[in-house]
Image (spheres, helix red, strand yellow):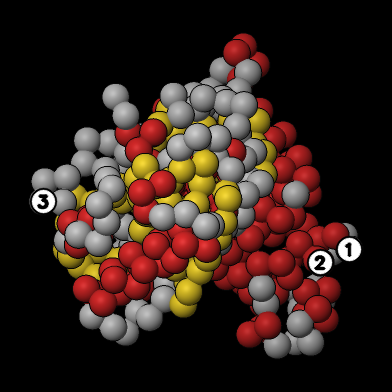
């Protein structure tokens, strides 16, 4: 049995796990991310987190085949520098090389959303499939493309940014600086904006009661709570939101024709209340659905473990 270390680097926590070759996590360990320290010191913390989880698993680094890490942003293959990680204050830093200097085994670094998608294909909701598209509906919209159980991110590893594909021409401004991105309409942040806009037009809506008239208390969950109680305004917002989501996903299906669509992130916890109407709308949006069918949208299973498992499996994913 071979064992790997997977590390998921976030702005709040550094999470690591020892993972066996079947994708099972043997041991987990995490520590807070000190984003205020210099780059080299934070990378040392990352390495120590990986080494500590090995110790806690009762192993040594001699038992480990490779180390993989999922990080915000992507690695530029032309210079091997991480491009930009806003929440860490990193821009064009030599993350792979510095991290490798702390280990005697091979180190692999890829985008964290890609790692999460790979984890779901290896050991999660899509474990019975070879090809999958995953999007995470959180503060933003992350995405990953898995083809033949390997990460697809284009010629320069910068592909797979599904949240920044265009949905509405000259639409709402996105955090990336562009306009009309899928993220601007299907993230939790977007759903909160859309809910508040509907509340302003419909003072009679139950939505006002759920937050005691305090708009600062509106969450993505709020509109679903009201929709469950058949509030007409909330039902309309949810329907429009799912429509945006189906439209975006249908484009990815047209391009990649995956076996399955994986939905993760906080909004995915709405379960069938989200997925049933989403799958129904996809039937009308996917090219030639009536003739050849299309993939089903399912909910991610692994939560935060997906990133650890996917990162640990990077060596296997990148083998020729």
Give coordinates of residue 68: x percent, y percent: 36, 49
The residue carrying mark 3 is: 79
Is residue 127 shown left or right of residue 8?
A: right
Taking the spot 39% from the left edge, 62% from the top edge, the residue there is: 51
Of badges 3 and 2, the one in the foreground is: 3
Cα–Cα gap, marks 1 and 2? 5 Å
What is the crowding at mark 3: few (fewer than 14 residues within 10 Å), some, or many (at least 20)?
few
Helix, strand or loop under label 2 = helix
Q: In terms of secondary structure, where does tag 1 sit?
A: loop
Q: Mark 1 — residue?
A: 229
- Quick one: label 1 or label 3, which is nearer the N terminus? 3
Looking at the image, do the residues carrying marks 1 and 2 touch, with CB atoms under 8 Å apart? yes
**Separation (CA) of disc 1 from disc 3:** 54 Å
Q: Is 146 in front, or is 64?
A: 64
Provide residue 311's location: percent of width, then percent of height: 42, 48
The quadrant of the rendering that contains the C terminus is top left
Question: How far is disc 3 from disc 2 in space, using C-alphas?
Answer: 50 Å
Residue at the spot 23% in from the left edge and 55% down from the top edge: 100
**To which quarter of the image does residue 267 belong?**
bottom right
Mark 1 or 3, closer to the camera: 3
Q: Residue at x 66, y 67 (%)?
A: 220
Dot 1, how many residues are within 10 Å of its Cα: few (below 14), some (14-19), or many (20+)?
few
Q: Is residue 140 visible?
A: no
Q: Which residue is labeled 2 in the image?
A: 226
Left or right: where does residue 54 sit relative to residue 103? right
The crowding category of the residue bearing disc 2, from other C-alpha atoms within 10 Å (few below 14, some 14 to 19, many at least 20), is: many
- Tell me where residue 66 sits by quadrant: top left
Residue 104 showing in the rendered view: yes
Please provide percent x and percent y for residue 29. Answer: 52, 65
At mark 3, the secondary structure is: loop
Q: Position of residue 166 (x, y in %)?
A: 39, 47
Mark nearer the N terminus (3 vs 2): 3
């Amino acid at each position: 049995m071979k064992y790997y270390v997977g590390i998921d680097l976030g702005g709040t926590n550094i999470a690591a796990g020892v993972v066996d070759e079947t994708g099972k996590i043997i041991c987990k360990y995490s520590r807070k991310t000190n984003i205020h320290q210099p780059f080299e010191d934070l990378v040392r913390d990352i390495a120590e987190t990986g080494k500590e989880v090995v110790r806690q698993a009762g192993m040594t680094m001699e038992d480990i085949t490779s180390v993989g890490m999922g990080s915000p942003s992507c690695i530029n293959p032309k210079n091997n520098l991480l491009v930009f990680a806003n929440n860490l204050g990193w821009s064009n830093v030599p993350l792979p090389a510095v991290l490798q200097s702390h280990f005697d085994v091979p180190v692999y670094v890829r985008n964290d959303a890609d790692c999460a998608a790979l984890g779901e294909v290896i050991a999660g909701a899509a474990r019975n499939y070879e090809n999958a598209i995953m999007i995470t509906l959180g503060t933003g919209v992350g995405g990953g493309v898995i083809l033949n159980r390997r990460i697809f991110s284009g010629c320069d590893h910068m592909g797979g940014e599904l949240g920044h594909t265009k949905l509405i021409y000259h639409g709402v401004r996105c955090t990336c600086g562009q306009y009309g991105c899928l993220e601007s309409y299907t993230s939790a942040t977007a759903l909160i904006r859309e809910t508040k806009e509907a509340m302003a037009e419909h003072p009679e809506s139950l939505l006002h009661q759920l937050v005691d008239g305090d708009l600062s208390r509106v969450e993505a969950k709020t509109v679903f709570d009201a929709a469950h109680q058949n509030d007409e305004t909330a039902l309309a917002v949810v329907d429009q939101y799912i429509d945006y989501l189906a439209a975006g996903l249908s484009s990815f299906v047209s391009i990649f024709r995956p076996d399955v669509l994986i939905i993760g992130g906080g909004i995915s916890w709405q379960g069938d209340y989200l997925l049933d109407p989403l799958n129904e709308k996809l039937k009308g949006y996917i090219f030639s659905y009536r003739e050849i069918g299309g993939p089903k949208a399912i909910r991610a299973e692994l939560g935060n473990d997906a990133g650890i498992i996917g990162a640990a499996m990077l060596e296997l994913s990148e083998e020729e």
